Image (tube, rainbow, N blue to C red):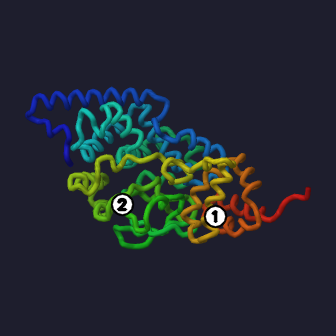
């Protein structure tokens, strides 16, 4: 694995600059740990999702919440694993960046960005270095563990490569590149903004409900060669996938910063979280629903791709009231039926309710 510090060996000036950059990184990490939560996260959105879903939340929502809480707990408790993951990530993926202005940021800003938004750094901390396993054993309360259902199987989920085929109703069709076999996964938006047959790397974890497996978070887009080599590396060792990414960076298949990602929420894998509406002259949630309903009315096969776009507004009581008032014309019924088939619980039941409301209005 390439080492950014090793490149300065034998050069006093470069070694001093590297040491200063490392000291800046350590100070930035301390400042970051002192904050209330990881900057750039969707923590407030995720908290609201947990509260609004309450007992209707499926086990995988709480399992994802557990994984997010584990990462935050490790940061705030000044556990050594986030630092180790940060250094591993820098050495593997950022060895060629300018240490004085990495990716154009000051060193402390660069460190904060990696902690908040680098997918590889979070994956190493949470899974490969045992962060979630420790959190479940030492910190998570029995109520959270019980609600998370199959979360006990999440820490052992291994990194592998997959080809995303298409969203089919409430499931995502993919190919496991290690076995070349098709797999059916819970569809919560991993295919959004991606072409058919896009290759990704990620971890499959139990859902606690059908169809049984899902990506523990939005997977990372990579080239076909890298995805296949990551899949094969699973048999070599727990962190062998990082060596594959390091080689891909060195060979130019992956660009610097490729693993910096927009955060996602618990219920949806759309980058930045599920939208709360569309800005315009009307009601944002209603305008968003109209756009999705128009798309599904024109082509019912798009329901699987479009359904996760609505998860945010289907959660909010005020939005649901506005949608029931503005999006339940008789002409919308078939689109709501298609979306109900494309939504996982509990969103499917909400779409069914909206379909049932189409064409019916109380007497004046």
The residue identified by callout 1 is 294
Q: Residue at x 46, y 35 (%)?
A: 39
Disc on res. 160: 2
Q: Residue at x 27, y 34 (%)?
A: 101
Few, some or many residues within 10 Å of mark 1 (<14, 14–19, 20+): few
Asked if residue 126 can be seen in this view, the reply is yes
Q: Position of residue 52 (x, y in %)?
A: 66, 46
Q: Nearer the viewer, residue 200 or 212?
A: 200
Residue 11 versus residue 347 in the image, above or below: above
> Quarter of the image holding residue 326?
bottom right
User: Along the line of sight, which residue is nearer the eye, 229 or 100?
Assistant: 100
Q: Quadrant of residue 126?
A: top left
Figure label count: 2
- Viewer-nearest of labels 2 and 1? 1
- Mark 2 or mark 1: whose residue is earlier in sequence: 2
Q: How far is mark 2 from mark 1, CA to CA? A: 37 Å
Q: Percent x, y for residue 268?
A: 54, 53
Measured as percent of width and height from the top left, residue 100 is found at 24, 32
Q: Is residue 301 above or below residue 326?
A: below
Q: Residue at x 36, y 57 (%)?
A: 159
SS at circle 1: helix
Q: Is residue 309 left or right of residue 334?
A: left
Q: Residue placed farthest to the right in the image?
A: 364
SS at mark 2 in the image: strand
Point out residue 42 in the picture as x, y percentages from the top left corner: 52, 42
């Amino acid at each position: 694995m390439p080492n950014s510090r090793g490149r300065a060996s034998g050069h006093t000036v470069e070694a001093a600059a590297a040491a200063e950059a490392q000291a800046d990184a350590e100070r930035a990490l301390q400042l970051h740990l002192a904050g209330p939560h990881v900057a750039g996260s969707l923590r407030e959105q995720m908290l609201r999702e947990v509260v609004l879903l309450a007992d209707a939340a499926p086990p995988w929502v709480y399992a994802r919440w557990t994984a997010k809480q584990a990462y935050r707990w490790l940061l705030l408790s000044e556990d050594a694993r986030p630092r180790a993951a940060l250094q591993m990530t820098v050495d593997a993926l950022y060895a060629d960046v300018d240490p004085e202005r990495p990716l154009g940021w000051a060193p402390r800003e660069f460190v904060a960005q990696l902690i908040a938004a680098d997918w590889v750094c979070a994956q190493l901390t949470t899974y490969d270095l045992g962060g979630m396993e420790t959190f479940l054993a030492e910190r998570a309360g029995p109520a959270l563990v019980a609600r998370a259902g199959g979360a006990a199987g999440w820490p052992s989920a291994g990194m592998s490569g997959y080809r995303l085929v298409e969203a089919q109703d409430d499931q995502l069709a993919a190919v496991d590149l290690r076995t070349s076999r098709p797999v059916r996964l819970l569809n919560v938006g991993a295919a959004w903004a991606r072409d058919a047959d896009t290759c990704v790397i990620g971890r499959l974890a139990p859902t606690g409900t059908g169809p049984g497996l899902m990506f523990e978070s939005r997977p990372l887009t990579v080239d076909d060669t890298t995805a296949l080599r990551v899949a094969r590396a699973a048999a070599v060792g727990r962190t062998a996938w990082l060596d594959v990414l390091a080689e891909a960076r060195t060979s130019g298949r992956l660009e610097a910063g490729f693993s910096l990602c927009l955060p996602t929420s618990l219920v949806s894998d759309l980058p930045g979280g599920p939208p709360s509406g569309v800005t315009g002259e009307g009601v944002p949630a209603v305008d968003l629903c109209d756009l999705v309903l128009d798309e599904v009315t024109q082509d019912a096969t798009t329901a699987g791709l479009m359904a996760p776009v609505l998860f945010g507004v289907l959660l909010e009581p005020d939005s649901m009231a506005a949608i029931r008032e503005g999006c339940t014309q008789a002409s919308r019924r078939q689109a709501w039926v298609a979306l109900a088939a494309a939504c996982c619980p509990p969103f499917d039941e909400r779409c069914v309710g909206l379909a049932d409301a189409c064409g019916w209005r109380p007497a004046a």
